[in-house]
Amino acid sequence: MRRAAALLAVALALAGCGSAEDGVRDEGFVAAGDRAVVSPATGAEEADAGSMAPQPAPGVAIVYFLRYDEPAPTRRSVPVGETVAESGLAALLAGPSAAERSLRYSTAIPDGTRLVAYAQEGRTAIVDLSALPDPQADGGQEALLALYQVVYTVTAGGGIDAVKVRVDGRPYGLGSLTGDTDVLEPPLTRADLSFVVGAEAQLGSTGCAVLKEDAEPYAGEPALELVRPQDGTVVGETLQIRGRLLSDGGPIVIRLLQNGLEVSNRIIDERCRGAFSATVPVPRTLAGAVELVVSTPETETAPALEARRVVEVAGA
């Protein structure tokens, strides 16, 4: 599949953490329903996360294809005896119907991809597929979209919160797009991939779990946590950042420093609470130890917060 523009290698610009523009379609025909969906906030709000996605009726699976390179949900009937998640996966691997293709629906899942194995541990699904796009090709654009399709399809039924994606038994996730795949790579949630919807077609975008307008004030201890990268991580052309903001804060300021001088930056300019992600381009001339500084300014409801890591840039 040819994409009209580069989404970005891993990541992340929310042109608003918004919802997809197209309504949910029913096996190739327009159907009434909720619009596709933004990332749920984490923490105390995670219990309500399912309400932010289109909720399928019994016997109905919501499957995420692409339309004009943006994720777009469709509906499929669930055969008797099949679970919603497995039926949705089967429909996803089968691809858009002829009617949907005539309406410019497509998919990033390679033709002929098979479901090797499916299992569930609590509210986490383990999905092992025979193939997915090469994460190192085209800046990881197709791989990122394929991950979105799999995770959003499997979690659409409401009984699963996260998905471990594998290809012939090997972990496949956001780390794959930057070449640092870890056997212990955590499962992916909708919040981890919400930035894909409405993302700007440029390298180095940013995104976070949007704080809902009616959310209760955060009552816990404010904290800024970095999940990735860890100290000493070796990076190439881009630096993938993942973390959680446990407060009613924002914006999130991301800076790369070398010898005290700023060499690159990104800003997530919106109110956040929960998961956030970013990919910061690394200047081609940069090499050696680089300090990552992620911070939020003081607000009326939260103090200033900061987290630091030191990474190693491999250089050209």
Image (cartoon, helix red, strand yellow):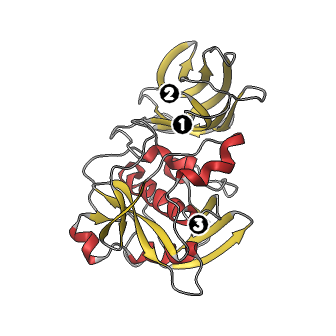
In this rendering, the count of numbered labels is 3
User: How much space separates mark 1 and mark 2, taking CA atoms?
Assistant: 8 Å
- The image position of residue 11, as x and y in percent, is 46, 42
User: How much space separates mark 2 and mark 3, taking CA atoms?
Assistant: 33 Å
Q: Do the residues labelled 2 and 3 touch (CB within 8 Å)?
A: no
Q: Nearer the viewer, residue 292 or 216?
A: 216
Q: Around disc 3, counting alpha carbons within 10 Å, would you say few (fewer than 14), some (14 to 19), or many (20 or more)? A: some
Residue under circle 2? 270
Residue 74 relative to residue 244: left or right: left
For the point 29% across and 65% down, the residue is 105
Residue under circle 1? 210
The circle drawn on residue 107 is: none
Q: Earlier in the sequence, mark 2 or mark 3?
A: 3
Disc 1 marks a residue whose amino acid type is: Val
User: How much space separates mark 1 and mark 3, taking CA atoms?
Assistant: 28 Å
Residue 305 relative to residue 155: left or right: right
Q: Nearer the viewer, residue 101 or 19?
A: 19
Q: Do the residues labelled 1 and 2 touch (CB within 8 Å)?
A: yes
Residue under circle 3? 166
- The image position of residue 195, as x and y in percent, is 47, 43
Q: Can residue 179 be seen in this view?
A: no
SS class of the residue under badge 3?
strand
Residue 49 relative to residue 121: left or right: left
For the point 57% across and 24% down, the residue is 250
Disc 2 marks a residue whose amino acid type is: Glu
Question: In the figure, 193 relative to 126: above or below?
Answer: above
Disc 3 marks a residue whose amino acid type is: Arg
Q: Residue furthest right?
A: 221
